[in-house]
Image (cartoon, grey):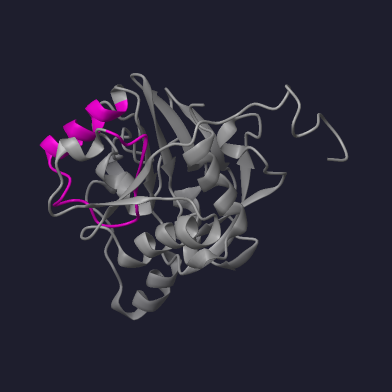
């Protein structure tokens, strides 16, 4: 190393290798699960255990240190009992890493502190009746809300382990208009303060919705941690800065 302590010196700490697992099968998206598996198996050659969602039992988590919830639609699968199992496991020292759509199954549910952006705001009287839609402008209206894919600057707290190795400005790849508020009891490590894209397209309505929202963050729950990754950091295996954040979520957060 050109600067800093030697890699073999006493100033360099060690990280215990965690037993990493990921949920597999519906409701996870096969592409997201594949990206998680490819990252561990082919890119860093680290073992990952795939846990079946159709035969999920609390005992499957007994030896797991880090559990990854790939992107997906968890509404039907994430029952109150299963959410309680995951919460109890985290409280005993586990680390839960939620990617993309998996966050929706945790938002607004105790003991998780994640909340949808604007969830606590009451609707104004002007909005009570809704807005009349015009058929002739339906295509333009759809584009205003569209999030087909765009790159945005992220304000990252590089003093936090989740952002270790990132340099300013950090960036994220947005493919969804789902917005979450800054964490009040956790750490908002990555924030989208200005939602204007630096590359790609995002509708103006979607930009307003996503301003000042969470990109990634962490929260202590009992003796464990939850890592919220609102955007998929492993999308198609090419988003390298996302891989840095994901690696930190698995190996550094909580150590």
Q: Which residue appears at 24% of the width and 34% of the height?
A: 86
Q: Which residue appears at 16% of the width and 36% of the height?
A: 58
Image quadrant containing the N terminus = top right
Number of callouts in the render? 0
Q: Residue furthest top?
A: 222
Position in image of residue 216 (x %, y %): 49, 41
In the rendered view, tell whether residue 87 sits above or below residue 104: above
Instruction: Report if residue 75 lies within the magenta region.
Output: yes
In the picture, measured across the screen, residue 106 lies left or right of residue 220, that is left
Kindly indicate the quadrant of the structure image that contains residue 175: bottom left
Q: Which residue appears at 12% of the width and 42% of the height?
A: 79
Q: Residue furthest front?
A: 8
| Highlighted magenta segment, given as a residue range | 63-90
Residue toward you, 152 or 159: 159
Residue toward you, 179 or 71: 71
Position in image of residue 217 (x %, y %): 48, 36
Q: Residue furthest bottom?
A: 136
Residue 38 in view, yes or no: yes
Residue toward you, 8 or 210: 8
Q: Which residue appears at 81% of the width and 29% of the height?
A: 5
In the picture, measured across the screen, residue 21 lies left or right of residue 167, that is left
Position in image of residue 77 (x %, y %): 15, 50
Instruction: Report if residue 222 lies within the magenta region.
Output: no
Residue 195 in view, yes or no: no
Position in image of residue 232 (x %, y %): 45, 56
In the rendered view, tell whether residue 177 sits above or below residue 16: below
In the rendered view, tell whether residue 72 sits above or below residue 199: above
């Amino acid at each position: 190393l050109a600067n800093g302590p030697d890699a073999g010196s006493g100033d360099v700490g060690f990280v215990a290798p965690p037993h990493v697992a990921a949920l597999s099968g519906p409701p996870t998206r096969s592409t997201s699960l594949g990206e998680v598996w490819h990252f561990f198996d082919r890119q860093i050659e680290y073992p990952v255990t795939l846990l079946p969602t159709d035969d999920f039992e609390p005992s499957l988590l007994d030896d797991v240190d880090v559990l990854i919830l790939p992107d997906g639609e968890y509404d039907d699968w994430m029952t109150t009992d299963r959410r309680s199992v995951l919460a109890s496991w985290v409280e005993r020292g586990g680390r839960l890493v939620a990617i993309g759509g998996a966050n929706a199954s945790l938002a607004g549910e105790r003991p998780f502190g994640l909340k949808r952006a604007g969830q606590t705001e009451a609707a104004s009287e002007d909005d009570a009746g809704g807005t009349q839609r015009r058929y002739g402008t339906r295509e333009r209206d759809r584009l205003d809300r569209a999030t087909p894919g765009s790159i945005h600057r992220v304000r990252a707290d590089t003093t936090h382990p989740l952002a270790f190795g990132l340099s300013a400005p950090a960036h994220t790849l947005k493919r969804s208009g789902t917005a979450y508020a800054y964490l009040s009891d956790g750490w908002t490590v990555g924030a989208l303060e200005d939602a204007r894209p630096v590359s790609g397209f995002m509708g103006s309505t979607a930009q307003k919705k996503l301003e000042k929202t969470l990109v990634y963050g962490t929260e202590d729950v009992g003796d464990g941690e939850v890592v919220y990754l609102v955007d998929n950091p492993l999308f198609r295996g090419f988003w390298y800065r996302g891989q840095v954040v994901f690696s930190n979520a698995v190996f550094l957060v909580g150590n």
